Image (spheres, rainbow, N blue to C red):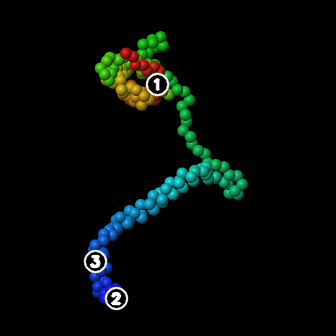
Amino acid sequence: MADDLDDDDIDDIDGEEETEGEEKPKMSLMKKGLFFGLPVLILILGGVAAFLLLSGGGEDEVALVCDENGEHCVAPEVHVEEVPEEVYYYYLQEEGEDDGIMVNIRSSDGRPLLLRLRVAFESTDPELGPVLHEHLEPVMDQFITFLSELREDDLYGSAGTHRVRLELLRRVNLVIEPAQVDQVRIQEFMIAN
């Protein structure tokens, strides 16, 4: 029976098999690019990252300056910014006073809280003390206004105290302008019921 079939019948049978069976989906150019290109890209990026991490930085080389004969070579001078020799600390309260700043703040559940804060100002300017003493009332007004608007959640964690410190520094520098305070140091920071 297989001998009775001619070539045309064989082609028809092959064609029927293709139509009856599931056709293989052809992969588009985009899919081929993603299928082969993405793993290659990941391997290249991984190799570059490994090279950068493992190569390490060596010592920076310094070009030596030599005389005409090449006998006496010295490294060029590097100018380093001078570090201030003395740092001065100024306090809002006089030495005998222990009150600090006390303000009411809002809690997250509505109960009243009391914030007690003592700060010191750090500066390299030896003449800042009289300027701060002259502007004590406006500085205190700025601080109390800012602190009384805070909520309990604003103060928790190191990020909270950092934000408070930066805002106090900004406010004191606005009041005593053109003089400047370099840092605000928090000496006491307490929240009480």
Is 77 displayed left or right of 170 in the figure? Answer: right
What residue sits 67% from the left and 54% below the top?
67
- The local crowd at label 3, few if under 14, some if 14 to 19, many if 20 or more residues have their Cα within 10 Å, is few
Query: Pointers 3 and 2 in contact (CB under 8 A)?
Result: no
Please, what is the three-letter code of the amino acid marked with disc 3?
A: Glu
Element marked by disc 1: strand
Q: Position of residue 6 (x, y in %)?
A: 31, 88
Residue located at (69% from left, 56% from top): 70
Q: N-terminal of the two: label 3 or label 1?
A: 3
* Residue sitting nearer the eye, 31 or 162: 31
Q: Is residue 157 visible?
A: yes
Q: Position of residue 113 (x, y in %)?
A: 35, 17
**Residue nearer the viewer, 102 or 14:** 14
Residue 148: in sight, yes or no? no
Give how far across and how far down residue 181 sits, in percent: 44, 27
Sequence-first disc among 3 and 2: 2
The answer to whether residue 100 is above or below residue 175 is: above
Q: Distance of mark 3 from mark 1, alpha carbons? A: 88 Å
Q: Secondary structure at mark 2?
A: helix
Residue designated by label 3: 16
Distance of label 3 from label 2 (alpha carbons): 20 Å
Q: Amino acid at mark 2?
A: Asp
Q: Is residue 58 above or below residue 11?
A: above
Residue behind mark 1:
185
**In the image as oriented, which residue stretches furthest toward the right?**
71
Which residue has dot 2 on it?
3
